[in-house]
Image: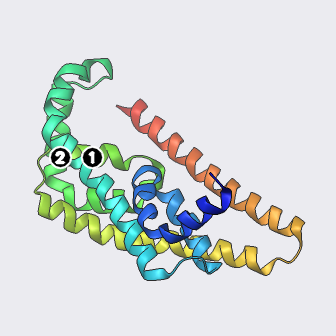
Amino acid sequence: MEPGFVVNLLLAYKYALMAPAAFLLGPTVSLFSGFLLRLGYVELVPTWLALAAGELAGDVLWYWLGWRYGDSFVARFGRYVGITPHAIENVKHMFNRYHDAIIFFSKLTAAFGLAPAIFFTAGLSHVPFRRYMLLNIAGQVIWTSGLLAAGFFAGNIFASVNSVLGKIFSVAVVILVLVALFGFGTYLKKRAESSD
């Protein structure tokens, strides 16, 4: 297979490929898409719609898994990861009381790696699906727009630098920021697990 054929394929189906990429890789694809937006390789509206659709599909999957298999998963494997039936009842009670804020803000902080567990818990707690999706879509509008803006800003820096060394430096800074965000998310996840 020739490299030119692969490049042409990617350019022809870029928006169709963005949705599954966002589903699998999440925020990284949105940041990179903002970068491509600034460089003129993609257009705003189809990019935004593809990214939002991909991430929302992932959220629906986590919700469905929690709704369908949450109780059986906890009963079967909960003891191996420190989840007790009493803890689940406490989480369900808290979730039923504050699910609006929990779902909305977890969508806005999805880069920290806690969103899948929260969306699984939303399904486990049987939060009404319509309510769940309305909150998720509201958060998705802000989340996708913010990530595209951040990627666009990084692309703007990249485009304004004229030297090869400057371009390498700007890419390195973006990578360091992504690594720092990932590390902070991992830290928060470990801290949340240790507090349980």
Q: Secondary structure at mark 2?
A: helix
Report which quarter residue 133 is drawn in.
Answer: bottom left
Query: In this orientation, which residue lies closer to the viewer: 125 or 195?
Result: 125
Q: Which one is earlier in the sequence, the residue at label 1 or at label 2?
A: 1
Query: In this orientation, which residue lies closer to the viewer: 116 or 91?
Result: 116
- Residue 123: mark in rendering: 2
Query: Is 38 displayed left or right of 27 in the figure?
Result: right
Under mark 1, the amino acid is: Trp
Marks 1 and 2, Cα distance to the nearest angstrom?
A: 8 Å
Vertical relation: 142 (above or below) 172: below
Under mark 2, the amino acid is: Gly
Vertical relation: 59 (above or below) 77: below
Residue name at image x 58 percent, y 67 percent? 8
Residue lying furthest front: 1
Residue name at image x 27 percent, y 46 percent? 62
Q: Secondary structure at mark 1?
A: helix
Which part of the image, by quadrant, shows the C terminus? top left
**Could you tell me residue 69's position as x and y percent?**
16, 34
Q: Residues within 10 Å of mark 2 (few under 14, many from 20)?
A: many
**Could you tell me residue 141's position as x and y percent?**
36, 73
Query: In this orientation, which residue lies closer to the viewer: 158 or 142?
Result: 158
- Residue 62: mark in rendering: 1
Residue name at image x 51 percent, y 68 percent? 147
**Which callout, 1 or 2, points to the residue nearer the camera?**
1
**Could you tell me residue 50's position as x and y percent?**
39, 69
Vertical relation: 181 (above or below) 39: above
Do residues under tags 1 and 2 come within 8 Å of each other at their CB atoms?
A: yes
Query: Is 3 displayed left or right of 58 in the figure?
Result: right
Report which quarter residue 125 is drawn in.
Answer: top left
**Could you tell me residue 7's position as x and y percent?**
61, 63
